[in-house]
Image: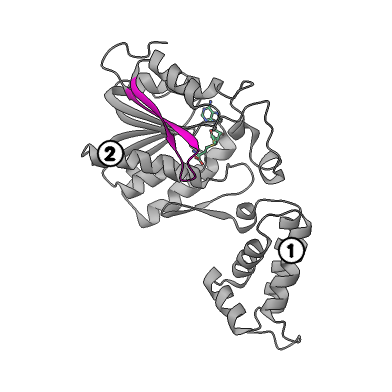
Amino acid sequence: MPDQRRPPVLITDIISQASSQLREAGIDTPEHDAKLLLAEATGAELRDVDRAMMMGECVGTSEQLADFRAMLDRRAKREPLQYIVGHAPFRYLDLKVGPGVFIPRPETETVVQAGMDWLTANGLDHPRVVDLCAGSGAIGLSVATELPGSRVWAVELSRDTAQWTRRNLMEASRSHPSIASNYQLEIADATALTTLAHLDGAIDIVISNPPYVPLTQVPQQPEVRDHDPELALYGGSADGTLIPERIITRARRLLRPGGVLIMEHDVSQGDRLVSFAAHAGFTGAYTGKDWTGRDRYLFAVASADARGAV
Ligand SMILES: C[S@@+](CC[C@H](N)C(=O)[O-])C[C@H]1O[C@@H](n2cnc3c(N)ncnc32)[C@H](O)[C@@H]1O
């Protein structure tokens, strides 16, 4: 309902002014972001904002519009939209995010889908799953909620980030109570051979989105460069493959023969990581693509011999 104490403001005017502010700040999707922030501030859905715009309606109380303007100012300073609204969609989940946690990305949904497809094709409805470098919990919590028979172990190095993982675990357990006992989070170095060592040789699938940004390619977007935690971004070497290669080595030991590693990587790293996997005791390694056709993940099957060859 429009506020009676102020002259009503047409939603089309609000969105037009807000879009200009965001466009001037260099944001690529100014109208979308403005509509999403208005929806958040007024407790509405994006489709309600679209409908109100079509109908030429007025929206928001003065408090809600003040909240909206505060959010808009944060966005104009290039704070990520997801940090401002406090959550981010990922597959069937709505994950809580904020400073200290990597915002889950759409390309990682493709990586999880590749894992779900392999599990389905192999009839594994009670798989043992490891998510190395868990962040918000996007990968492991997706598997645990979409496949209730699974057991998931997730590993995250940062204590600050792990608070977000736990928050999302608690949230997801409300709608999927079984995951409270089927999902386990370890705060540890995912590349260390001692981490989850009791599971060596027993895991069906490792799905991972490790830090992989080449140190020589600092992201240009302020939302990424200035807000995603550095620990979540950089792969530890000029070409960014150091940590991904360590993840391959660790995954090889965790997997049973015939188990699978699916690991996201940078578009530039496909050939190198396929070759590394072949030397590390995997067979049938190939590079999977995201839906824009870019090389985005390693798929590799643990061979029957030479566990952890490198
Ligand atoms: C690219 S983010 C991915 C987060 C989440 N899996 C996702 O897909 O949205 C990488 C995560 O790995 C964590 N990390 C970095 N190095 C690590 C290590 N050696 N062991 C465990 N976690 C690590 C970072 O803190 C960050 O949360």
Q: Nearer the viewer, residue 54 or 99?
A: 54
Magenta stretch: give its range.
283-301
Which of the 4 image quadrants contains residue 242?
top right
Q: Secondary structure at mark 2?
A: helix
| Residue matched to label 2 | 119
> Is ligand 1 within 8 Å of the beta carbon of the residue shown at mark 1?
no
- Residue 68: x and y in percent read 69, 68
- Report the quarter where the C terminus lies: top left
Residue at the extreme left of the image, as rendered: 123
Task: Give the vertical position of 87 relative to 295 (above or below).
Answer: below
- Residue at 54% in and 33% down: 267
| Residue matched to label 1 | 70
- Report the number of numbered marks: 2
The type of residue carrying mark 1 is: Ala
1 or 2: tag closer to the N-terminus: 1
The type of residue carrying mark 2 is: Leu
Main structural element of the magenta stretch: helix, strand or loop? Answer: strand
| CA separation in Å, label 1 and label 2 | 45 Å
Which of the 4 image quadrants contains residue 241?
top right
Which of the 4 image quadrants contains residue 219?
top right
Residue at the extreme front of the image, as rendered: 293
Judged left or right of residue 9, residue 237 is left
- Residue at 69% in and 39% down: 225
Task: Give the vertical position of 48 relative to 223 (above or below).
Answer: below
Q: Any magenta on residue 261? A: no
Q: Nearer the viewer, residue 251 or 296?
A: 296
